[in-house]
Image: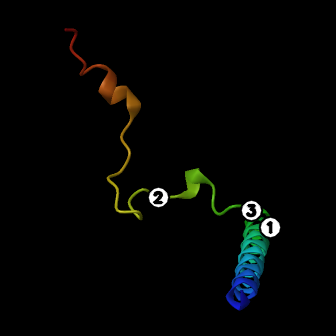
């Protein structure tokens, strides 16, 4: 029966470790959220150049309207 109390102790240590890890993760999540809010979330979408991201440049939407053919 000696192993029974040892397994309970080990289980309790595991539970404490899991709780500590969960608490640490929640604190880090809150810190990232606070940093994101204080930074302003990065540049506005209009300020990002698609060419800098490796994307082709945007074309006017009016060009695509006349090329559609009815089925």
Residue 33 in which image quadrant: bottom right
Percent coordinates x, y for residue 20 in the rendering: 77, 79
Name the side, left or right, on which 59 lies relative to 16: left
Percent coordinates x, y for residue 43 in the rendering: 63, 61
- Give the quadrant of the N terminus: bottom right
Is label 3 or label 1 in front?
1
Q: Which mark is residue 68?
A: none
Task: Kindly state the secondary structure of the residue where label 3 is placed.
Answer: loop
Judge whether 9 appears above or below 52 on screen. below
Name the side, left or right, on which 46 lies relative to 63: right
Is label 3 or label 2 in front?
3
| Local crowd size for mark 1, using a 10 Å CA cut-off: few (<14), some (14–19), many (≥20) | few
Residue 6 in which image quadrant: bottom right
Judge whether 67 appears above or below 9 on screen. above
Q: CA distance from mark 2 to mark 1?
A: 27 Å
Is label 2 or label 1 in front?
1
Residue 11 in which image quadrant: bottom right
Residue that mark 2 sits on? 49
Task: Kindly state the secondary structure of the residue where label 1 is placed.
Answer: helix
Task: Kindly state the secondary structure of the residue where label 2 is placed.
Answer: loop
Residue that mark 3 sits on? 40
Residue that mark 1 sits on? 34
Residue most toward the top?
Answer: 71
Q: CA distance from mark 3 to mark 2?
A: 19 Å
């Amino acid at each position: 029966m000696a192993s029974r109390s040892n397994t309970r102790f080990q289980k309790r240590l595991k539970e404490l470790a899991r709780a500590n890890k969960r608490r640490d993760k929640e604190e880090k999540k809150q810190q990232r959220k606070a940093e994101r809010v204080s930074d302003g979330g990065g540049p506005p979408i209009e300020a990002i150049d698609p060419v800098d991201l490796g994307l082709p440049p945007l074309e006017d939407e009016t060009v695509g309207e006349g090329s559609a053919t009815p089925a």
